[in-house]
Amino acid sequence: MTRVKILALLAAMVLLFTLTTTVSAQRVPPHVFVGDASIDDVAVAEGTSITAWVGGVEVVSATTTGTGGDYVITVDQGDSSFSGETVSFQIAGLDAAQTATWTQGGADLLTLSASAAETPTPEATAVPEATEVPEVVTEPGEQGPRGMAGATGIAGAEGPEGPEGSKGNAGATGSQGEAGAAGDQGAGGPAGSQGATGNAGGQGQPGSAGLQGDDGSNVLGVIALILAIIGIVGAGGAFLLSRRS
């Protein structure tokens, strides 16, 4: 059975559940048949008639879809009672070899096949007006409970590394700290070396002339002058000697 037929059967079951919750207490859900139809082992063309019969009376018809002879047919008992009745089928007016038992809310996968060599069943008599199925006006039912959450899928592969972000702005300048306390005074340095001897001073002015002595004392004056000159020269020589040393 193809995936399409399985999905169609599931859709039919959902339809039956909806009808069960919405129809009045006097009505019961129909029996739905899903499958494919063939004549002489060849799938019938799209639009081929499929009919369902109960008690020799045609109760519903449908047409095939697609190229595989797929069909969906809903057998609703209406105001009648089909419980336990045999449902037979025709494909394009040919009797199908398969039958089924009608059940309330049934949903079956059923492959139908017929042979063109068989004589078609005579056209069925019309259903009396008294047995026609009245149109049912249904109201939307209450919303069903929410289904369970599906399992968590497998985590995807790690994505590529993103581009490097832009450089942030420079931070604000911090406030200037307070000046530190002054350090202790350092110890005194060692004494410096002795400086060089200064240059010799210029020659002093000649001394004033001594008082004139009495006669006969000029010789003493001259001697005193000579001694003064020698003293001056000696002082200059001593100064020069101290410079050299």
Image: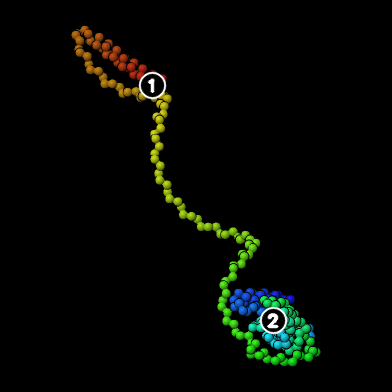
**Residue 128 coordinates in the image, percent (x, y):** 66, 90
Q: Is residue 43 visible?
A: no
Residue at the (68%, 79%) spot, across then down: 31
The crowd level at tag 2 (other Cα within 10 Å; few <14, some 14-19, many 20+) is many
Earlier residue among tags 1 and 2: 2
How many marks on residues?
A: 2
Extreme residue toward the right, this view = 117
- Residue occupied by mark 2: 82
Q: Tell me which amino acid carries mark 2.
A: Phe
Q: Is residue 105 visible?
A: yes
- Residue occupied by mark 1: 243
Of residues 146 and 29, which is closer to you in this image?
A: 29
Disc 1 is placed on an element classified as helix
**Residue 169 coordinates in the image, percent (x, y):** 46, 54
Quadrant of res 196: top left
Quadrant of res 179: top left
**Residue 167 coordinates in the image, percent (x, y):** 50, 55
Left/right of residue 123 with respect to residue 180 in the rendered view: right
Disc 2 is placed on an element classified as loop
Residue at the (22%, 14%) spot, across then down: 210
**CA distance for labels 1 and 2:** 157 Å
